[in-house]
Amino acid sequence: MVHWTAEEKQLISSIWGKVNVEECGAEALARLLIVYPWTQRFFDNFGNLSSPTAIIGNPKVRAHGKKVLTSFGEAIKNLENLKATYSKLSELHCDKLHVDPENFRLLGDILIIVLAAHFGKDFTPSCQATWQKLVGVVAHALAHKYH
Amino acid sequence: MLTAEDKKLVQKVWEKIGGCQEEAGAETLERMFATYPQTKTYFPHFDLHHGSDQIRGHGKKVVAALGTAVKNLDNLSQALSELSNLHAYNLRAKPCFTLQLLAQCFQVVLAVHLGKDYTPEMHAAVDKFMSAVAAVLAEKYR
């Protein structure tokens, strides 16, 4: 089980409290599809992903980004119990979506960069360290039910 | 690997952080040590406290090397040849993966400083650039 210090929990909630889940989620997913274009393979039915502009403006990308980050919010509410929280989602990503868990790590890193761009200097090294730990743990929980 | 457009974007990013390149180096290292403590194992001889002269000095070196890479995007292998030897034979840092950690922290520093100006296109180009640099530095490992 992952241990979170009081300071880490504070760093997580203070940043999360100021995140616009819809904007941030949309941007993170768009950047994933732009920076790592092979991830587009999971979104064949999303329509036009032919350029960064198309991806950023794509309403399905925006909607799905919001969904993904909303789910991330669930993780934050259940830090002591991530594997159970993500059990069904993990099975889904393995059995139905067939997503290589390496991609969760990529999305995590992208989210960190989106937060950094948004929060600037407030995204201190301690913040980054805590959030990288968080995205790592989330990725691990999502991969837990793979077989 | 890097398209003409990628190269232009990387150069643009480099210009944008013109004045604060040195700080960017120190901050990148500081973030790397805070976020990935295993990277400290390569610097047992350093004072790793915030603001240490050694971190500043080394950050300056790292950024200068990246600057050399930016000026020689058409010929990374040759431009970074010495550094490649150093990393392979002297420093022997676990290739590719460790440099990926540095790259992530460098991207965060760029995002912190450039905010909205750090567009997805720049992000993609810099990501490719850092991968290319890491690949060259890993060339001589075995």
Image (cartoon, coloured by chain):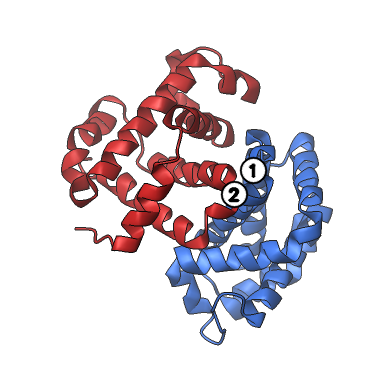
Cα separation, mark 2 vs mark 1, equals: 6 Å
Q: What element carries label 2?
A: helix
Q: From the viewer's perspective, is B36 left or right of B89?
A: left
- Work out which quarter of the rendered image holds the C terminus of chain A and state it: top left
Q: Residue furthest left?
A: A84
On what subunit does the disc labeled 2 rest? A
Q: Residue A1 carries which label?
A: none
Residue B24 figure quarter: bottom right
| Visible residue check, residue B78 | no
What's under tag 2, amino acid-wise?
A: Gly
On what subunit does the disc labeled 1 rest? B
Q: Sort mark 2 into few (<14), some (14-19) or many (20+) by Cα contacts within 10 Å.
A: some
Looking at the image, do the residues carrying marks 2 and 1 touch, with CB atoms under 8 Å apart? Answer: yes
Q: Chain A: what color?
A: red
Number of callouts: 2
Residue positioned 54% across, 79% down in the render = B48
Q: Position of residue A94 (x, y in %)?
A: 26, 33
Residue A90 figure quarter: top left
Residue positioned 67% across, 74% down in the render = B56
The residue identified by callout 2 is A120
- Work out which quarter of the rendered image holds the N terminus of chain A and state it: bottom left
Q: Chain B: what color?
A: blue
The residue identified by callout 1 is B115
What's under tag 1, amino acid-wise?
A: Gly
Q: What element carries label 1?
A: helix
Q: Where is residue B9 in the image (x, y as percent from the top left)?
A: 76, 40
Q: Where is residue A72 in the image (x, y as percent from the top left)?
A: 33, 37
Residue A7 figure quarter: bottom left
